[in-house]
Amino acid sequence: MKKVYLDYGATTPVDKEVLNEILPFFHEHFGNASSIHSYGKEAFDAIENAREQVSGIINCKADEIVFTSGGTESDNLAIKGVAYINKDKRKTKGNHIITSAIEHPAVLETCRHLEKQGFTVKYLPVDKYGMVNPKDLEDAISVNTFLVTIMYANNEIGTIEPIEELGKITKKHNVLFHTDAVQAITKIPIDVKKLNIDLLSVSAHKIYGPKGTGALYVKNGIKLEPTAHGGGHEKG
C-alpha cells in the first residue's frame, strides 16, 4: 500500500535544494564559526549569509536575527528573556503578560512557568473561530503590562490572528509584542516593521528545512536575558 503523508502542518521533509546547501557543512566546511582560522571564517560567513536571507523574509536587519534550535527555544527565549531582564524592574516596569487561551504549548507552558515566579498572566479568550478580539487586548492592557504574546497562525485550526491590529494596540501602549509565526512564515507575507512586531519566532522544519533549527527576530534595542549561558554564540 502506498503511503500518503498529510501532516505537513506538523513537519515537512527537507527540500533537496536545502539538503544540497547544508550537506557540505557536515564534511567539508565543518569549521567552528567562532574560530579565527579560515575554516572558522568560512563557517561564520555562511551563518551570516543565512542571517541575511532570513531577515529578508520579514523585512528586518540581519543583526536582528538570532538563530535557535527551533520554535520552542525561540518562544522561550523571547518570553523568558524579556521577563527576566525586567525582573528587577518590576516595581517600575510591571509584571503583567498577556497571551491567548489557544497558544502553542511552548508559549502557554512558558507563561505558566513565569506565573510560578511571581509574574501575572492574562489569558485572552477567543471566539468560535479561535480569533482574539483586539478590544479584549485593549481592555486587558494595564500600566503593569510589559509583554503581549499572540501567535500569528494557529497550529491546530489554522486561524490567522489580526496581528496588524494587535500590533497597533501594543505600540500605542508602549508594550512589547511577540508573535509565534512558526505556522505563518513564508505562507503569509510578514513585515515586522509594518506590523509593529518586536519579537517573532520561526522554525525551519515547518517549511522544508532541517529539524533542530529556528530563529528569533529581536528588534534592535530590545534586551533579552539569555536562557543558556556560556559560549557567547547568538548573543548568549
Image (spheres, rainbow, N blue to C red):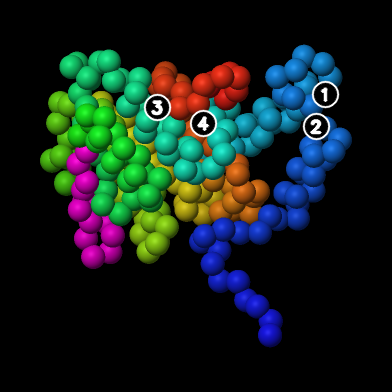
Give the Cα distance between marks 1 and 3. 32 Å
Residue under the point 60% across and 42% down: 213
Label 1 sits on what residue type? Tyr
- Kindly state the secondary structure of the residue where label 2 is placed: loop
| Label 2 close to label 1 by CB (< 8 Å) | yes
Mark nearer the viewer, 2 or 4: 2
- Kindly state the secondary structure of the residue where label 3 is placed: helix
Residue 108, position in %: x, y? 32, 46
Q: Residues within 10 Å of mark 4 (few under 14, many from 20)?
A: some
Question: Mark 4 — residue?
Answer: 60
Residue under the point 57% across and 39% down: 69
Label 4 sits on what residue type? Cys
| Label 1 close to label 3 by CB (< 8 Å) | no
Residue under the point 23% across and 56% down: 126
Give the Cα distance between marks 2 and 1. 7 Å
Question: Mark 1 — residue?
Answer: 39
Mark nearer the viewer, 1 or 4: 1
Give the Cα distance between marks 3 and 2. 30 Å
Q: Which of marks 2 and 4 is nearer the N terminus?
A: 2
Q: Which of marks 1 and 3 is nearer the N terminus?
A: 1
| Label 1 close to label 4 by CB (< 8 Å) | no
Label 3 sits on what residue type? Gly
| Label 3 close to label 4 by CB (< 8 Å) | no
Question: Mark 2 — residue?
Answer: 30
Q: Earlier in the sequence, mark 2 or mark 1?
A: 2
Question: Left or right: where does residue 177 sit relative to residue 173?
Answer: right
Question: Left or right: where does residue 33 sit relative to residue 37?
Answer: left
Question: Mark 3 — residue?
Answer: 81
